[in-house]
C-alpha cells in the first residue's frame, strides 16, 4: 500500500466504459511524515477523497479488481482510505 496526498482530479470525455461515473485522482506519494516524494500515480477514488487529503492507495491490479468486484476491470490503483493521522515511533 502507498501513502499519498490527493493533488488533483482527472476529467476525460472519452474513456473505457468502466470509468463512467468514477473519479480519477492524481495522488502524490508521500512519506509517513508527510514529505512529498517525486512520484505520483492516478487512482480511482472509492472513498470520496478530495484535494489535499492524505490517502491510502492499493497499487496492484488484482487487489484493485477485487475491491471493485470485477475480474476484468482495466484498473491498477484505487484509493481505499482517507488518513486522519499517522503515528510513527522512532
Image (spheres, rainbow, N blue to C red):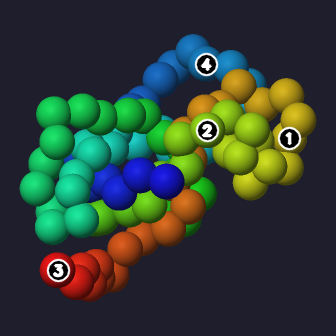
Real-space CA distance between mark 3 and mark 4, rounded to the nearest whole angstrom: 45 Å
Residue lying at 24% horizontally and 33% vertically, measured from the top left: 39
Q: Which mark's residue is nearer the viewer, 1 or 4?
A: 1
The x, y position of residue 87, in whole percent, is 26, 84
Q: Which mark's residue is nearer the viewer, 2 or 1?
A: 2
Real-space CA distance between mark 2 and mark 4, rounded to the nearest whole angstrom: 21 Å
Residue lying at 38% horizontally and 34% vertically, measured from the top left: 41
Real-space CA distance between mark 1 and mark 4, rounded to the nearest whole angstrom: 17 Å
Q: Which mark's residue is nearer the viewer, 1 or 3?
A: 3
From the image, tell me which residue sits under label 1: 70
Q: What is the crowding at mark 3: few (fewer than 14 residues within 10 Å), some, or many (at least 20)?
A: few
The kind of secondary structure element at disc 1 is loop
Residue 61 vertical placement versus 63 (above, below): above
From the image, tell me which residue sits under label 2: 60
Residue 1 vertical placement versus 34 (above, below): above
Residue 15 - label: 4
Q: Which mark's residue is nearer the viewer, 3 or 2?
A: 3
The x, y position of residue 75, in whole percent, is 65, 32
Classify the position of the C terminus by image quarter: bottom left
Q: Which mark's residue is nearer the viewer, 2 or 4?
A: 2
The answer to whether mark 3 and mark 2 are in CB contact below 8 A is no
Residue 45 - label: none
Residue lying at 51% horizontally and 20% vertically, measured from the top left: 13
53 sits left or right of 57 in the view: left
From the image, tell me which residue sits under label 3: 90
The x, y position of residue 21, in whole percent, is 64, 43
The kind of secondary structure element at disc 3 is loop
Disc tally is 4
Chain-order first, disc 1 or disc 4: 4
Q: Quadrant of residue 89?
A: bottom left
Residue lying at 88% horizontally and 35% vertically, measured from the top left: 71
Amino acid at each position: 500500500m502507498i501513502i499519498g496526498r490527493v493533488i488533483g482530479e482527472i476529467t476525460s470525455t472519452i474513456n473505457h466504459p468502466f470509468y463512467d461515473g468514477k473519479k480519477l485522482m492524481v495522488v502524490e506519494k508521500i512519506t509517513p511524515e508527510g514529505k512529498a516524494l517525486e512520484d505520483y500515480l492516478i487512482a480511482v477514488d472509492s472513498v470520496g477523497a478530495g484535494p489535499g487529503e492524505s490517502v491510502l492507495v492499493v497499487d496492484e491490479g488484482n487487489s484493485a479488481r477485487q475491491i471493485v468486484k470485477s475480474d476484468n476491470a482495466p484498473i491498477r490503483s484505487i484509493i481505499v482510505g482517507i488518513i486522519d493521522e499517522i503515528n510513527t515511533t522512532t
